[in-house]
Image: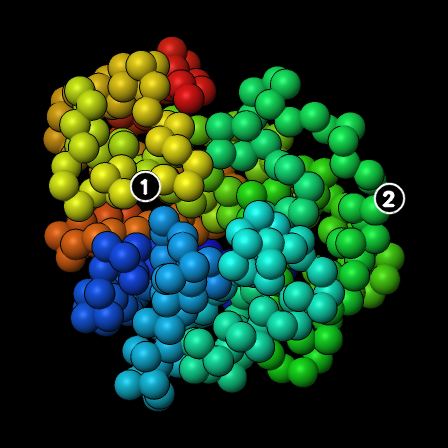
Amino acid sequence: MQYSVLGSSGEKVSRVCLGSMTWGVQNSQEDANEQIDYALAQGVNFIDTAEMYPVPPSARTYGDTERIIGNWLAANPTRRNEFLLATKIAGAGLSYIRNGGMITGESVMQAVDASLQRLQTDYIDLYQLHWPNRTSPHFAKHWPGKVVLSQADTGQEKQQMLEILQALQTCISAGKIRYVGLSDETPWGIATYLQLSEQHSLPRIVSIQNEFSLLHAKDWPYLIEHCVRENVAYLPWSPLAGGALSGKYLHDQVPAGSRWSFEQRQGIFRNTPMSQRAIARYVDLAKTHNLSAVQLALLWCDQVEGVSSTIIGATSMMQLKENIAAFELKLNPKAKSDINMVFREFPLPF
């Protein structure tokens, strides 16, 4: 297993981060236990979750993924220091989470305490803001006109950010969290948090996790350059585009029990005619280089400059083993060149 430094934290994290959002809907406690045990045995030392999980989110299952991890920790109390545990506070929009309210200083402190209780641990290594209070250009809202940028009050946004950082500082001082990060953010969001941290001697953002894959690489190079220059770890989520880059959804197939067979909160926005064409090309390309489509997609993501650790998820042990093993391989120059030709043809297919 290869390791990277988690931004300015100085902590070393595996190039593979074990995602957990299927635990509680598609996966049971027993499944999660097996995945955690296997990942740790392979050298993975980074696990990511969120208070909102599992996905698809619902009032009935809210917090269950954290509870599943907490049950594993309770059964393995001596193993807590084997990995960095990351979780996230949900933003506005879900009525059953703090009445759908936005992230505030007060909600941060409430959410941290609730996560600690569900996780059955004394501290969270990396505490992240799942999405910003303003509408951000993620989940297929990256096209011009999808987000009205001028709707947000910049002064109010900055004041909210400052209040959030102050609450995070309180949690760090209390020993409840160690580092802080962002999710589904933009260059302006990163820059503003870093500026406020410096101005007010508050916790510095050490990481950001955004969607990033062969089908959705809008963060290269502008946001990722910002991360490299400011020593912020970039953590891609959905490197397989919700499983689409495996090829299993080609020709409008939806295998029983797969993620797309469940109701999607944002809709199946990655499934477009252009995406189908791009995926088919990548699947064929993988075969010519004696790789699986999954290996091709994960290896490409891992070799992008600025990527620190890629968040993977699996619903079966077979998938998990294939995903982790992919990071032991390398793309040869010809494969990189061939991928680049397809990528140029389909830079943003959804």
Q: Is residue 185 above or below residue 300?
A: below
Q: Which quadrant is home to the C terminus? A: top left
SS at circle 2? helix
Q: Which quadrant is home to the N terminus? A: bottom left
Residue identifier under label 1: 263
SS at circle 1? loop
Left or right of 283? Residue 343 is right
Q: Is residue 350 above or below residue 172?
A: above
As measured in the structure, the alpha-carbon distance from the residue carrying label 1 to the one carrying label 2 is 37 Å
For residue 5, the mark is: none
| Most foreground residue, 161 or 146 | 146
Q: Is residue 276 visible?
A: yes
| Most foreground residue, 136 or 325 | 136
Task: Give the residue drawn at x 82%, y 38%.
Answer: 153
| Most foreground residue, 79 or 111 | 111
Image-quadrant location for residue 256: top left
In contact (CB < 8 Å): disc 1 and disc 2: no
Q: Residue furthest top?
A: 345
For disc 2, the neighbor class at 10 Å (few under 14, some 14 to 19, many from 20) is few
Left or right of 105? Residue 35 is left
Marks 1, 2: nearer the viewer: 1
Earlier-in-chain disc, 1 versus 2 = 2
The amino acid type found where label 1 is placed reads Glu
| Position of residue 160 measured from the top left corner of the image (x, y, whole percent) | 78, 54
Question: What scheme was used to colour the molecule?
Answer: rainbow
The amino acid type found where label 2 is placed reads Gly
| Most foreground residue, 262 or 214 | 262
Residue identifier under label 2: 155
Task: Give the residue drawn at x 27%, y 31%.
Answer: 245
| Position of residue 211 measured from the top left corner of the image (x, y, whole percent) | 46, 39
Task: Give the residue drawn at x 44%, y 36%.
Answer: 266
